[in-house]
Image (tube, rainbow, N blue to C red):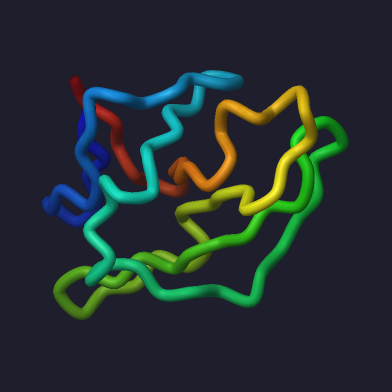
Amino acid sequence: MKAIWNDTVIAESNETVVVENNHYFPAESIKKEYFKTSETHTTCPWKGKAHYYTLAVDGKENPDAAWYYPEVSLLAKGIKGRVAFWKGVTIEA
């Protein structure tokens, strides 16, 4: 699977985990040069506290377009530390 934004592959892996129709990519599969830490956090009742990244590609930014859970509940242990996307990021096989 590939995550693509601004015509650039920002993550690629054959080991994604799908939860609630979102592909969660292994942390080591993201191209870190396109990710900037965000101060945004949200809480999911069953997964835990989400942390966000802003994507930065070719001078354009997409605030909080990627998220991950550094700590998760037992129900969500399969996505701990994995990264998922939204806000115009396309996922392709």
- On screen, residue 20 above or below 83: above
Return the x and y of residue 31 as percentages of the image width and height: 22, 58
Q: Give the vertical position of 47 relative to 53 (above or below).
A: above
Q: Nearer the viewer, residue 6 or 31?
A: 31
Q: Which quadrant of the structure image shows residue 79?
A: top right
Q: Position of residue 12 (x, y in %)?
A: 20, 39
Give the residue at x 44% y 68%.
54
Left or right of residue 82, residue 58 in this image: left
Q: Residue at x 21, y 69 (%)?
A: 57
Count of numbered labels shown in the rendering: 0
Between 71 and 93, the residue placed more toward the observer is: 71
User: Closest to the observer: 81 or 37?
Assistant: 81
- The quadrant of the image that shows the C terminus is top left
x, y percent for residue 27 = 38, 49
Q: Nearer the viewer, residue 46 or 59?
A: 46
Query: In the rendered image, which quarter contains the N terminus?
Result: top left
Expressed as whole percent of the image width and height from the top left, the position of residue 8 reads 13, 53
Q: Residue at x 24, y 46 (%)?
A: 11
Task: Say which residue appears at 56% left-offset and 50% top-offset.
Answer: 68
